[in-house]
């Protein structure tokens, strides 16, 4: 079956969507990510969508679901690299993805994730 | 408003399954390229609207046909007109179906209302038992 | 009918020089600006070319609907209308180019015709024909004017929305003048493209120069900010004057969690802080010593 590769990097999961995301593929990605977050106790998920030229309501909803599921499993989600035209179209469509963190590129996205996890570590240190 | 449009070429696709949705998107993407002078945003909006409506045709209309036309209006402005026709159960209350967030199929209810906001012109014709026809047109802004 | 048309074509051929002279005279009389803007050589050349094409087409098929025969005449009229539209002629002055051919032409027809019936037929046929061609020039004229206007609108839009980088990663979009929905679209696109181009984390939208903010403009601003957020950039609105603040509240527009600052300076201070920078006085001398 066709699926999008998910890379594991320490405590984070990395996904770069390079192909057209059709409905079934998006659902498979959602399942794969949820399974992997749970199996590896990942603390963050980074999804690079810079290659996507459209995000319609189905894909948008799937991305929001991924973020919500990860949050329940105690992982932060960052969406990076959305193109301007895609962003304008999503807003016009009524999809603003509240609750999903965003960043301009993979580098900034990783910084965001590290900050999110790092802050918690500080708290733990304080507690110990 | 634009009764005097002229169609220069057209192509149609049957919508029966998920792969056909991809075919519709690919076709719209391809037709929205130069010489038609759509901006990237207009192009993205049109492909997204097509994706929403094709999915509606597949899920709610139980399949149907998609038609794409290269049109010119009285001011020599070029555009693309997309039509989605199905012989499905039809929509009993169009006004309600056009509201944001209204859905009968478990979606986000942004398909029809969202698609309307993405294009220059939008029309819908539907009745219970008679199927549904949705037509959208995107005009190029630049000359 | 066809015979009639050929006769007219013959009359034009025989009296071409006279008709041309009178016709140009008429054009000059009815279009006062013609002499100033356009040289008489141009007028002569256009008129002569039109007469040739016109009589050639008449010999073929006298009904102006025939596209293959009259195509060349129409193309010629199109170029005349277009050039006149650009030179600033009025629509009626442009249409007069065709209409003023009537009088000299009908005069020659009267001289040459053998009976009142044939004359009446010929005059009627030519009137319908020239009327339709005259109206066609007016139509093309309006169309080319419309295109000029659209083009200028586009150019104006492109010019009026500069995106500037204030500091590495901090953009400013100073908005000046009224925002209509067309312009706001272009503002939105420019800003988002700028964010990608400069890899900016923060953009300041300064509306000091915007005279009024209505619900639509406010919504567009909110949409722009939402789109920027989806891309991973934050927006600050600055320069909201008291009246505009009142309007926004009065209209019931919810700016949500959009950050607002009174002045561009305040906004810049906040933006710099967000990228981990600040403004501080220089410690040592002024550099003059």
Image (cartoon, coloured by chain):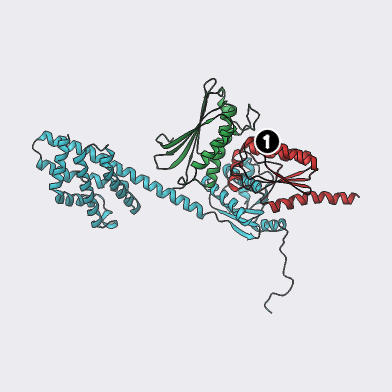
* Image x and y of residue C154, in percent: 47, 50
* In front of the other: C21 or C175: C21
Q: Is residue B49 left or right of residue C6?
A: right
Residue C210, position as x, y percentages in the image: 57, 51
Q: Residue at x 26, y 41 (%)?
A: C70
Chain letter for cyan, please: C
Asked which quadrant contains residue A68, the reply is top right
Residue lying farthest to the bottom in this orientation: C289
Q: Residue at x 23, y 48 (%)?
A: C50
- Residue C265 or C165: which is nearer the viewer? C165
Name the residue beneath numbered marker 1: A27
Along the horizontal axis of the image, is A35 left or right of B84? right
> What is the x, y in percent for residue C287?
68, 76
Secondary structure under tag 1 reads helix
In the current view of this chain or complex, which residue is farthest to the top?
Answer: B129
Using the image, name the chain to which the residue with label 1 belongs.
A
Residue B112 appears anywhere in the view: no
Image quadrant in which you'd find residue A94:
top right
Residue C215 in which image quadrant: top right
Task: Chain A: give its colour.
Answer: red
């Amino acid at each position: 079956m066709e699926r999008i590769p998910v890379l594991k990097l320490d405590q984070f999961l990395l996904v770069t969507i390079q192909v057209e995301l059709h409905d079934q593929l998006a659902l498979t990605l959602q399942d794969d990510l949820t399974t992997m977050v749970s199996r590896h106790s990942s603390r963050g998920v980074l999804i690079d969508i810079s290659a996507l030229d459209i995000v319609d309501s189905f894909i948008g909803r799937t991305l929001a679901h991924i973020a919500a599921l990860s949050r329940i499993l105690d992982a932060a989600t960052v969406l990076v690299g959305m193109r301007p035209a895609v962003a304008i179209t999503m807003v016009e469509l009524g999809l603003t993805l509240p609750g999903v963190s965003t960043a301009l590129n993979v580098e900034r996205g990783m910084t965001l994730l590290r900050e999110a996890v790092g802050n918690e570590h500080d708290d733990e240190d304080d507690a110990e | 408003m634009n009764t005097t449009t002229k169609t220069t070429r057209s192509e149609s696709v049957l919508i029966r399954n998920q792969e056909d949705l991809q075919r519709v998107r690919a076709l719209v993407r391809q037709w929205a390229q130069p010489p038609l002078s759509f901006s990237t945003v207009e192009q993205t909006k049109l492909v997204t609207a097509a994706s929403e409506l094709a999915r509606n045709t597949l899920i709610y209309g139980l399949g149907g046909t998609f038609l794409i036309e290269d049109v010119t209006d009285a001011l020599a402005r070029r555009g693309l007109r997309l039509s989605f026709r199905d012989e499905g159960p039809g929509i009993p209350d169009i006004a309600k179906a056009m509201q944001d967030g209204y859905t009968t199929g478990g979606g986000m209810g942004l398909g029809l209302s969202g698609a309307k906001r993405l294009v220059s012109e939008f029309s819908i014709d539907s009745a219970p038992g008679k199927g549904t026809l949705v037509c959208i047109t995107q005009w190029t802004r630049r000359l | 009918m066809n015979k009639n048309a050929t006769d007219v074509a013959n009359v034009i051929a025989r009296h071409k020089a006279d008709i041309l002279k009178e016709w140009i005279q008429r054009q000059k009389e009815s279009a006062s600006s013609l002499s100033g803007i356009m040289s008489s050589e141009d007028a002569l050349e256009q008129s002569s070319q039109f007469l040739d094409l016109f009589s050639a087409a008449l010999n073929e098929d006298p009904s102006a609907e025939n596209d293959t025969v009259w195509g060349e005449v129409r193309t010629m009229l199109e170029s005349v209308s277009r050039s006149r539209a650009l030179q600033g002629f009025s629509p009626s002055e442009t249409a007069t180019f065709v209409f003023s051919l009537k009088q000299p032409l009908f005069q020659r027809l009267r001289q040459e015709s053998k009976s009142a019936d044939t004359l009446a037929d010929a005059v009627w046929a030519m009137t319908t024909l020239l009327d339709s061609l005259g109206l066609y020039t007016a139509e093309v004229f309006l169309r080319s004017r419309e295109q000029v206007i659209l083009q200028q609108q586009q150019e104006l839009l492109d010019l009026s929305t500069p995106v500037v980088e204030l500091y590495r990663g901090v953009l400013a979009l100073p908005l000046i003048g009224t925002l209509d929905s067309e312009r706001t679209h272009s503002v939105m696109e420019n800003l988002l493209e700028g964010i990608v181009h400069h890899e900016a984390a923060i953009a300041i939208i300064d509306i000091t120069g915007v005279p009024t903010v209505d619900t639509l403009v406010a919504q567009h601003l909110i949409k722009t900010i939402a789109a920027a957020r989806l891309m991973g950039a934050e927006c600050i609105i600055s320069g909201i004057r008291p009246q505009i603040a009142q309007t926004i509240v009065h209209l019931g527009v919810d700016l949500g969690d959009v950050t607002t600052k009174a002045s561009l300076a305040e906004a810049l201070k906040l933006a710099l802080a967000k990228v981990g920078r600040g403004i501080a006085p220089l410690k040592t001398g002024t550099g003059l010593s």
